[in-house]
Amino acid sequence: MENSFTIRQDLTFSEFFSSALYYYLSGKSLKRFFLFLLGLSLLSMFLGFLTTSQSVDIITIISTFAPFIILFLIGIIVISLICLYIYKSQPHLFKNVSYYFNHWGVVRHGEQTEFSKPWRDITKFKETKAFFLLYIGSTDFHIIQKRIFENDKVMNDFRNLLNENLN
């Protein structure tokens, strides 16, 4: 098993957007907010049925959940606009970036950015079908694309390195 990796990557907008969506939609505070809205919607629907004694129709159900759906769609639009702005205004964060992982931690080299963190400062990582997401602190995350690995063995070695140093 390798204990150091050099990863060179160029992130496309769709990769950045999908990882940002994953990051923000998997956050606890957003989940709690939508669960709260869902609870309020169900409570208002239930109380409405108790007071009107009418049968349940599809229009009532849709109108009860409409604010929830509209707020969710507005959130997706806002996240996509923010991602587009960041991607277009700071291309040095996404193009010609190299990560170096070793026993100490991670070093990131880019055109206008330099970054290094020991393993103890990386709080966790999550793995999806397309990428590894490294969480650094409570608001920073870094995307490592799976497509850049030569084969499954190298990707498994990288996953093992993350597991050893973060668990």
Image (cartoon, rainbow, N blue to C red):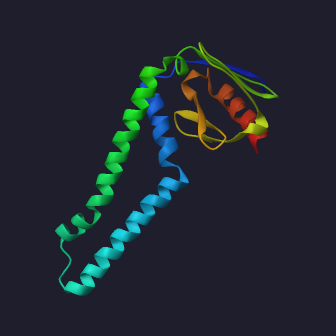
Is 4 in front, or is 86? 86
Q: Quadrant of the N terminus?
A: top right
x 26%, y 67%: residue: 64
Residue at 78% over, 39% down = 120
Q: How many numbered marks have been drawn onto this rendered protein structure?
A: 0
Return the x and y of residue 54 as percentages of the image width and height: 17, 83
Q: Is residue 107 left or right of residue 130?
A: right
Image side of residue 85 versus residue 29, left or right: left
Q: Residue furthest right?
A: 103
Tell me where residue 41 sits by quadrant: bottom left
State the residue at coordinates (61%, 16%).
Answer: 110
Q: Position of residue 94 (x, y in %)?
A: 52, 21
Q: Residue at x 44, y 65 (%)?
A: 36
Residue 26: % across, % down = 51, 49
- Using the image, determine if residue 55 lies above or below residue 123: below
Is residue 141 or residue 159 the one in the foreground? Answer: 141
- Compared to residue 76, the image places residue 1 above or below, namely above
- Residue 10 x %, y %: 52, 18
Left or right: 114 in relation to 120: left
- Residue 167, by quadrant, is top right
